[in-house]
Image (cartoon, rainbow, N blue to C red):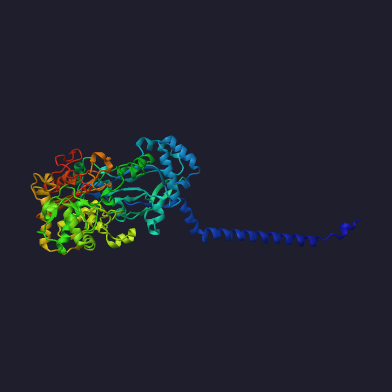
């Protein structure tokens, strides 16, 4: 007998339910397979190029290729600044999992100082691209390179590359002319435009001073690039393609290494500056600032102790005296004051004055005393006044001419303005006027200011480069040419730049030339001893400049003054007088006698250029002691 449950079981219904469930599962499986197929197609077909590119980026990178910096040559074609290969240890910070551990390991393998680590940390902060290698050590030895190669598998992100580093074969000889390159600093990066940022990719140094800085755009060149394939550690396996960089252009200078050495030898270790110009072109044949320094110290980053020693030295070796040092020119400007008097008709070559050795303004109590006690005689004319450096004559002439005409005339010579020489940071000095004093000091112009200005004292300040240009302008009879150190860039000649031409009658120039020749060759010329035995005629003018004030009526006592408070010795000259070729300006700091201390230096420079009598720094002639220092008055200006 069948049970009740068996009687009511519906097999057909269960079969339909099972069938529906199977169909549903098949539909779900089809949809899932369809979604998977769609995803596969999307990744493998639609996004193929995207992921291929991402994959390539993991192993293919664009690297900047820095250009080779242009070279610098002297007048004779001697190389003054070149690029030397060196192996550099760098770290790609993004490719290191533990930077501190990597640095510790590197310190155990090669010599890395605290200064190296300090520079490295600064470079990390200023790097411009995440994958840019940051230099840690320059000039690796072969032994150090071998140690790093053996441990390469342990050094993630560490690279050893051959790089070109700037080198100055003659060290300090051209330190203040050529300057130096140095590591690109945060301050440099902050000043970069977007274009400059791209241009300096892969470059770690930039011109910091001198010609290296002034001609940075010319010397640097254009950066190149290359696609490289790397492994998982970021090491380059091969170069896929490359765009070569454009090397920097070479500079050929007017500077002559033989003239530069002669200037240093003639200065005999004394502080000061020497500038020699080619009268016809304005080319700088020599420019020396002493003491000097070795620019190679700065190329890969100077150490703290070395920089402190240079920066805190009482002699200030980093200070470029020939463009940044400004000094009272003293009597060296008297030829220009005399020419102004002739030009404006205030005096003539025959006019004479009585010189009692003192000068007093009308209705004034103050007395100016000439360097020569008792004066220069009862009838001093222009020629004698320049030859013997008679202050009284020029006090009288300056007062009669007046500040306005004297200021205007001096401006024609470029006084009070930068010369425009192709070195940065030139100071312009001071050539005062009524307007300048009112604007700068809020004071009116006084007659006593004119008296002091007439002999290059008071507020007047000039640099040695200005004095050299001033002297060359006299030699050129009024044509003022901008001083220039670079003669050509690659094969392109840099043409001289004429700043202006002064219209003065020829016989006035003749009078000044004869008077300046009398300084050198006259029986009572202040620099006659410096010209003894010369085979050519030269023109010159000596000067001294006070460093500290001396009470009225007091005698200048060299022995009572500290060495650095003694007067500066100055001298300007050009030769040969019939057809001037070279103009020279010399300052010997605290040298006291322009005729005895600075004039012999100028003579040696002219002998070198005109006669080929070059000196080397090993030949250190002492200062000319045969010429006595003239005068002991409150104003020593001769």
Residue 344: x %, y % from top left: 16, 64
Quadrant of res 631: top left
Furthest residue in direction right, as rendered: 1
Quadrant of res 438: bottom left
Quadrant of res 394: bottom left
Q: Nearer the viewer, residue 204 or 627?
A: 627
Residue 432: x %, y % from top left: 27, 58
Residue 163: x %, y % from top left: 34, 45
Q: Nearer the viewer, residue 95 or 291?
A: 291
Residue 426: x %, y % from top left: 29, 54
- What quarter of the picture does the N terminus occupy? bottom right
Q: Is residue 101 left or right of residue 300?
A: right
Asked if one can make out residue 498 in the rendered structure from this viewpoint, the answer is: no
For image coordinates 86% across by 60% down, the residue present is 8
Q: Nearer the viewer, residue 390 or 481?
A: 390
Asked if one can make out residue 425 in the rendered structure from this viewpoint, the answer is: yes
Q: Is residue 263 left or right of residue 350?
A: right
Q: Is residue 246 left or right of residue 455?
A: right
Q: Nearer the viewer, residue 310 or 478?
A: 478
């Amino acid at each position: 007998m069948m049970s009740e449950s068996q009687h009511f079981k519906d097999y057909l219904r269960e079969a339909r339910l099972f069938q529906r469930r199977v169909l549903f599962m098949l539909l779900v499986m089809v949809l899932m397979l369809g979604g998977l197929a769609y995803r596969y197609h999307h990744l493998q077909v639609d996004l193929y190029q995207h992921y291929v590119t991402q994959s390539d980026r993991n192993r293919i990178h664009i690297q900047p290729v820095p250009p080779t910096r242009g070279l610098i040559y002297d007048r004779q074609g001697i190389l003054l600044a070149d690029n030397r290969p060196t192996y550099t240890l760098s770290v790609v910070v993004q490719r290191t999992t533990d930077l501190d551990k990597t640095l510790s390991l590197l310190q155990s393998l090669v010599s890395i100082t605290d200064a190296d680590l300090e520079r490295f940390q600064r470079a990390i902060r200023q790097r411009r691209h995440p994958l840019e290698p940051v230099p840690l050590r320059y000039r690796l030895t072969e032994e150090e390179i071998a140690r790093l190669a053996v441990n390469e598998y342990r050094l993630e992100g560490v690279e050893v590359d051959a790089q070109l580093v700037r080198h100055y074969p003659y060290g300090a000889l051209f330190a203040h002319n050529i300057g130096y390159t140095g590591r690109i600093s945060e301050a440099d990066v902050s000043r970069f435009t977007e274009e400059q940022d791209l241009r300096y990719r892969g470059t770690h140094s930039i011109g910091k001073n001198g010609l290296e800085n002034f001609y940075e755009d010319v010397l640097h060149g254009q950066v190149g690039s290359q696609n490289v394939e790397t492994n998982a550690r970021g090491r380059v396996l091969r170069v896929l393609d490359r765009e070569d960089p454009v090397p920097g252009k070479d500079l050929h200078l007017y500077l002559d290494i033989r003239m530069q050495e002669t200037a240093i030898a003639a200065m005999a270790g004394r502080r000061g500056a020497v500038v020699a110009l080619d009268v016809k072109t304005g080319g700088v044949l020599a420019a020396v600032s002493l003491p000097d320094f070795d620019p190679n110290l700065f190329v890969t980053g100077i150490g703290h102790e070395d920089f402190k020693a240079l920066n805190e030295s009482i002699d200030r070796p980093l200070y470029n005296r020939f463009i940044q040092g400004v000094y009272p020119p003293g009597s060296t400007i008297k030829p220009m004051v005399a020419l102004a008097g002739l030009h404006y008709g205030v005096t003539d070559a025959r006019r004479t004055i009585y010189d009692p050795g003192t000068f007093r303004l009308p209705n004034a109590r103050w007395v100016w005393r000439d360097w020569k006690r008792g004066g220069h005689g009862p009838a001093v004319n222009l020629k004698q006044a320049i030859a013997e450096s008679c202050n009284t004559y020029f006090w009288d002439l300056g007062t009669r001419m007046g500040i306005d005409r004297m200021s205007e005339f001096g401006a024609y010579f470029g006084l009070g303005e930068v010369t425009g020489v192709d070195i940065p940071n030139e100071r312009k000095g001071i050539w005062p006027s009524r307007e300048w004093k009112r604007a700068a000091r809020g004071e009116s112009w006084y007659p006593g200011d004119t008296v002091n200005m007439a002999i290059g004292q008071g507020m007047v300040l000039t640099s040695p480069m200005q004095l050299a240009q001033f002297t060359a302008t006299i030699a050129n009879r009024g044509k003022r040419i901008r001083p220039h150190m670079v003669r050509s860039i690659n094969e392109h000649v840099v043409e001289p730049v004429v700043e202006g031409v002064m219209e003065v009658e020829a016989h006035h120039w003749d009078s000044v030339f004869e008077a300046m020749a009398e300084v050198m060759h006259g029986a009572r010329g202040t620099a006659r001893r410096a010209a003894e035995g010369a085979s050519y005629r030269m023109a010159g003018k000596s000067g001294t400049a006070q460093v500290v004030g001396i009470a009225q009526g007091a005698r200048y006592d060299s022995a009572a003054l500290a060495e650095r408070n003694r007067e500066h010795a100055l001298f300007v000259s050009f030769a040969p007088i019939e057809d001037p070729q070279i103009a020279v300006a010399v300052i010997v700091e605290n040298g006291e006698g322009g005729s005895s201390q600075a004039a012999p230096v100028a003579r040696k420079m002219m002998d070198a250029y005109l006669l080929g009598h070059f000196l080397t720094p090993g030949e250190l002639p002492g200062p000319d002691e045969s010429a006595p220092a003239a005068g002991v008055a409150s104003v020593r200006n001769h």
